[in-house]
Amino acid sequence: MIVGLGNVGREYDATRHNVGFRVVDLLASDLKRSFRPGKGEYYISELHHAGEDVVLLKPTTFMNNSGIAVKSAIERFGVDPADLLVVCDDFNIPLGKLRIRKGGSDGGHNGVYSIIYHLNDDRFARLRCGIGTEEVVPGRDMADFVLSNFEADEIPEVEKMVKSAAEAVFVFINSGIQTAMNRFN
């Protein structure tokens, strides 16, 4: 299961916090698939790729409650958390950079925190997409920052990062987390 994190609604489409949605949208588009409402608080796209059944998931619970949707979906589809990849933004990583990890802490990301909390498990992989800029300074309201749109001059770097993140997901599916980490970190 590949989960892209974001917030639903047109007003959030171009925000920094919706990079996860953008990555899974690109994956679905590349595979000529579309999303449909799931039997929970999420949109899904089911596919078969490289000998694997894959579910792309976009929670509709808003970022801070992503774990509710993820828990419902993994129970419905019988997915082990070790077979879950969560794609999210990270303001602590420079814009355009990717970081893949096998598991661990939430890293200060409320969506990842919610998933860990609701699953009571942190053994899932994360693909963090850098949205940080030099303007990210201590004391700045991070909620305002992550809910802001990218600047016009940032968009080419964002599009390149989203494409690289989608490639990293394909490597994760085809060859596993270690190969994806070696290639994209």
Image: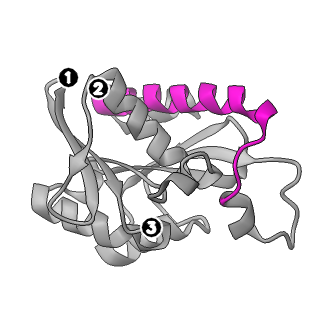
The residue beneath circle 3 is: 62
The residue beneath circle 1 is: 50
Callout 1–callout 2 Cβ contact below 8 Å: yes
- Segment colored magenta: 147-174
The residue beneath circle 2 is: 174
**Can you tell which quarter of the image residue 68 is in?**
bottom left
Neighbours of disc 1 within 10 Å: few (<14), some (14-19), many (20+): few
Magenta region includes residue 185: no
Main SS type for the magenta part?
helix
**Image coordinates for residue 3, horizontal then vertical, percent:** 36, 50
Q: Please state which amino acid type lies under the numbered disc 1.
A: Ala
**Camera-side residue of 173 and 42:** 42
Magenta region includes residue 171: yes
**Image coordinates for residue 102, horizontal then vertical, percent:** 43, 50
How far apart marks 1 and 3 lie (CA) works out to 31 Å
Q: Please state which amino acid type lies under the numbered disc 3.
A: Phe
Callout 3–callout 2 Cβ contact below 8 Å: no
**What's the image's color scheme?**
one colour
Q: Please state which amino acid type lies under the numbered disc 2.
A: Asn
